[in-house]
Image (cartoon, grey):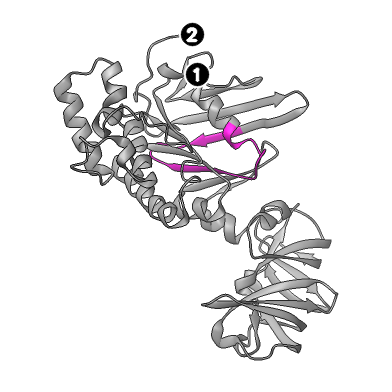
Amino acid sequence: MSSLPLSANASRSEPILVIDGVTKAYGNKVVADDLHLEIRQGEFFTFLGASGSGKSTTLRIVAGLETADRGSVRISGQVVDGVPPWKRNVGMMFQQYAVFPHMSVAQNVGYGLAIRGVARAEIDRRVTELLELVSLSGMGDKNVTQLSGGEQQRVALARALAPQPLILLLDEPLSALDEKIRREMQSELKRIQRQTGTTFLYVTHDQEEALTMSDRIVVLQSGKAAQIGAPEDIFLRPTSTFVAKFFRGSNLLDVEILDLDEARAEVSLNGVRFQCPRGSYSGGTGKAKASLRSENLRLGVDLTPDCVRLPAEVLDWTFRGTNADWRLRLGDGGVVTATTARRAHGQQSGTIEAGFLPEDLVLLSR
């Protein structure tokens, strides 16, 4: 195995990172299960999943901090199995800031360059450039402990970017911040990623964080890729009950599929027959599950002539400021949630007409 540092010499048409059949288990617990992924150059790619789904373990295998039981990892076209972390040309940013408290901001940012023997003038130039990038210009002489949590995380980001890694690995880097700063840092991370063109491989359990920042997301389920795609596709068009249930606001409905062609499905829901897109549904006719987002379930005056209409019993509703969540019982006994604008407040009990557009119903294959 070559011990030379990796460089960005692969074709830009090739994936910057290939995870090829990676499997990892701790005793009887499999945390990465024959995982196959390709991450593109300059992409913001996110591992999303619950605790124990294999997100951080896979990231650590890419970094060289863990060894896969089976499979391999390629970075910039080179197999890196057995290559130590410091020769993989990847950066890492963790949940804890891990800044050096005895150093100034500039010394923290330039640390990785200094231990690589980079000339002082080049370190100073790079540090100035990075402090401007992370909105900390003029703060280089400050002791890092004088900074807020969000500012310290910016220092950690600048330090990770300083050696210009091929890939930056980020393991829940914002989870220790309060909500306001976390939201600000989400926007900042995406801006910096776009500005630098660095490939970001990001780990989070936070749905909103993943949807806000990512170019593509893989939803992990017990070490397997449950679904891979753009945020909007995964959120609006889940392919399985697991992914549908993972995102807040998904209603799972029992339907019967009466007929299918390549593009459309004839469906019965609570005795109402209609046609909807087949989408990625790979099953046959008969009983199946479908997903309907709560914001796509309409009530009363919001119904249009092309809606599928269902009578429903109002169980309760919750005021949430700009909108309200209504819990409804359908004719088959199933309970669903509708999220509506405040103007839809009105009837608070009894029977109400609910409905949705057929194209908003997503048939689930598994």
Q: At which x and y percent is residue 164?
A: 31, 29
Horizontal relation, residue 194 to residue 225: left or right: left
Q: Determine the secondary structure under disc 1.
A: strand
45 inside magenta stretch: yes
Report the disc number at residue 341. Answer: none
Crowd tier of the residue under label 1, counting other residues whose Cα lies within 10 Å: few below 14, some 14–19, many 20 or above: some
Tell me whether the residue at label 2 lies in contact with that at label 1, contact meaning CB atoms closer than 8 angstroms: yes
Residue 122's place in the image compared with 188, above or below, is above
Q: In the displayed structure, would residue 237 be above or below residue 122? A: below
Query: Is residue 243 shown above or below 323?
Result: above
* Residue 230 in view: no
Spatial CA distance of label 2 from label 1 is 9 Å
Q: Image quadrant of residue 42?
A: top left
Three-letter code for the amino acid on which mark 1 is drawn: Val
Q: Position of residue 49 (x, y in %)?
A: 62, 45
Mark 2 residue crowding within 10 angstroms, few (<14) / some (14–19) / many (20+) = few
Tag 1 residue: 79
Which residue in the structure is indicated by mark 2? Answer: 1
Which of disc 1 and disc 2 is earlier in sequence? 2
Q: In the image, is residue 160 part of the stretch drawn in magenta?
A: no
Residue 233 on image: x %, y %:
55, 56
Q: Position of residue 132 (x, y in %)?
A: 22, 43
The range drawn in magenta is: 36-56
Q: Observer-nearest residue: 275 or 83?
A: 83
Q: Secondary structure at mark 2?
A: loop
The reply, left or right, for residue 197 in relation to residue 119 is: right
Residue 113 or 306: which is nearer the viewer? Answer: 113
